[in-house]
Amino acid sequence: MADVDIARLADGQREFDGLDLSKAALTDLLPPGPLVFRDCDLTGSDLTEAGLVQAVFEGCVLDRADFRRADLDGARFSGGGGAGARFGGAELIDAVFTDADLSGADFVNALLTDVSFTGCRLIGAKLSGCRGTGYTVARSNLTLADLSGCGFRGQAIEGVRFDDANLAACDFTKAVFTDCRLIRAHLVDAKFDKADLRGADLGEPDDTDLRRLRGAVIGHGQAAALLAARGLTVV
């Protein structure tokens, strides 16, 4: 069945529904022009250096798919899963990820400019060492993700879990957190100058982590909880 589905890529079509393209070398088989994949299985497929400008992936299985060095400018990923997918060195200008499972995905050295992740599962994802102007995240789970060195300066960050994430050297200057979690996040050399953390659950940071939050704004309730954990009572 997979061989039959792969052969359909050469039919001149640009929209594909429900194809089994798993574990296939697809780069040289893709027709030119923007492509649409709906409910296709691309598990473990090889799309290295593929031209996928403005491609659409709706409800597709992209687990362990290899998009390294692919051109994904303007691509749209919605629903489905891409656990362990590899995007290293890919170009992702204006790409959009919505409601996708990207747990363990690797974006190291990818070009991320005006990329958005909304409603995504990015547990353990690698987003460090990216090039470009960056990305935004909203209503997403980045527990255990590596975001070291990433920039969120001035962003409104809503509904994001950074629990146990590596946020070393991240720039959160003037960022505003709403309904977020930063429990046990690694904050070495992170910048929080004038960041608004009143909408963030900080957990029980130790004195070292509190010093790393220097310059941030927190609420009275947060301050009281932090002091209570150190044996002081706010009245």
Image: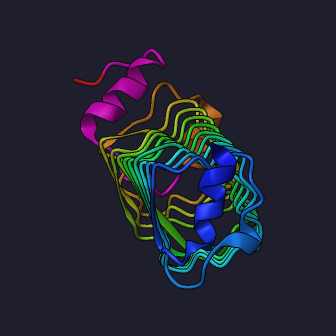
Q: Is residue 142 left or right of residue 21?
A: left
Q: Is residue 210 above or below residue 197?
A: above
What colour scheme was applied to this rendering of the protein? rainbow
Q: Is residue 211 left or right of residue 76?
A: right
Quadrant including the N terminus: top right
The structure residue drawn at horizontal position 36% and vertical position 24%, both measured from the top left corner, is: 225
Instruction: Estimate the x, y position of residue 179 in percent, counting from the top left.
Output: 30, 41
The structure residue drawn at horizontal position 40% and vertical position 44%, both measured from the top left corner, is: 160
Q: Is residue 95 above or below residue 150?
A: below
Instruction: Estimate the x, y position of residue 70 in percent, counting from the top left.
Output: 70, 72
Residue 134 falls in which quadrant of the image? bottom right
Q: Is residue 139 left or right of residue 230?
A: left
Instruction: Estimate the x, y position of residue 25 in percent, counting from the top left.
Output: 78, 59
Q: Answer yes or no: is residue 146 visible.
A: no
Quadrant including the C terminus: top left
Q: Is residue 223 magenta?
A: yes
Could you say which is closer to the camera, residue 224 or residue 65?
Answer: 65
Could you say which is closer to the camera, residue 110 or residue 15?
Answer: 15
Which stretch is magenta? Answer: 214-233
Q: Is residue 97 magenta?
A: no
Q: Is residue 33 above or below residue 41?
A: below
The structure residue drawn at horizontal position 51% and vertical position 58%, both measured from the top left corner, is: 192
User: Which residue is situated farthest in the bottom direction here?
Assistant: 33
Q: Is residue 98 left or right of residue 130?
A: left
Could you say which is closer to the camera, residue 130 or residue 35?
Answer: 35
Instruction: Estimate the x, y position of residue 122 in percent, counting from the top left.
Output: 54, 43
User: Which residue is situated farthest in the left direction here?
Assistant: 235
Could you say which is closer to the camera, residue 86 or residue 140?
Answer: 86
The structure residue drawn at horizontal position 69% and vertical position 67%, both measured from the top left corner, is: 130
Q: Answer yes or no: is residue 171 visible.
A: yes
